[in-house]
Amino acid sequence: MDFLGIINELTKKRVEAIKVNARAPGMLRAIERRNSEGYLALIAEYKRASPSGVIRLDLDPWTYFNAVGQYATGFSVLVEPIYFLGSPIFVKIALNYGKPVLYKDFVISREQIREAGELGASSVLLIKRLGGNALWDLVDYAMDLGLEPLIEVDDEDDALEIVNSNPNVMLGINSRDLGDLSVSLDRAISIIRAVRSKANVIIAESGVRGVNDAVRLAREGANAILVGTALMRNVELAKEFSGITIH
Ligand SMILES: O=C(O)c1ccccc1NCC(=O)[C@H](O)[C@H](O)COP(=O)(O)O
């Protein structure tokens, strides 16, 4: 098939996605359900690039979601267009698979949360260090729109502040320091240990390279792992990640 034939087929699929008008199922309940079955929940992230560079451009969203969908509890979709080569259309495409969908951006405004709701996402990422004093207003606004906030932290003090303020929210613990972009699973595990007795649901984000990393996080009390790079590079890992038990 020549390029025009290929792009014509892809464009037809994209147009179909644009027509989708649906709300994805809830992320929190899906994680709790997977945990009740005795397994760590996997949130598979569609991530084409990052500030470190291009990850994968030859893996279209349909191929990715088809490959990981049967093993993932939910999807995370980057919509940030500059560093991550993301797009809101990827959220619409993810809706086709009947799974919860996390709208992933650097959210600083109600307009972005409104976009997440209009697209049909289940959940929206709110980064504690980015939200600052507006964080709880953004949390309330998201919940008013029927979205589940995932509040992300990368240090122990912020994690404790969140779980002491609202233990019922989903807490994302990022092993990536959003200041210097260093990644440390040990730091994430230290934060998990500090809050696991108080947190409702802990999602360990970033730096999961393989099964051993995921098993460590499960043993320390993570309810879910959010994996991007490793899955974009090898979608076969989804099956392995989905079979990790929690204690
Ligand atoms: O992924 C990055 O390099 C990054 C840099 C700066 C801010 C945020 C960044 N990532 C966003 C994420 O939260 C990750 O995409 C997600 O946790 C998956 O991480 P990974 O499995 O390590 O790709």
Image: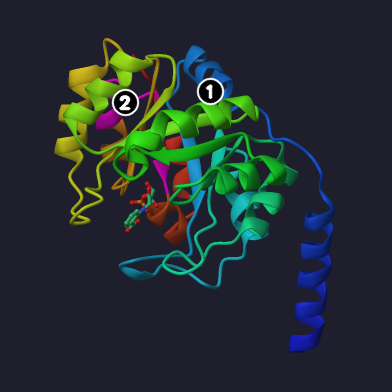
Asked if the stretch drawn in magenta spans residue 176, the answer is no
Task: Mark 1 vs mark 2: give the one in front.
Answer: 1
- Which corner quadrant of the image does residue 229 belong to? bottom left
What is the three-letter code of the residue carrying label 2?
Ala
Image quadrant where one finds the N terminus: bottom right
Magenta region: which residues?
A: 216-227
Q: Residue visible at 21% across and 35% down?
A: 188
The image shows residue 92, relative to residue 120, as above or below, that is below
Respond yes or no on whether mark 1 lies under 8 Å from ligand 1: no
Image quadrant where one finds the C terminus: top left
Question: Is 127 placed left or right of 235 in the picture?
Answer: left
Residue 19 in the image: x percent, y percent? 84, 53
**What's the mark number on residue 218?**
2
Q: Which sits in the foreground, 125 or 4?
A: 125
Q: Taking the image as drawn, is residue 7 in sight?
A: yes
The image shows residue 39, relative to residue 217, as above or below, that is above
**What's the mark number on residue 48?**
none
Question: Is 193 placed left or right of 113 in the picture?
Answer: left
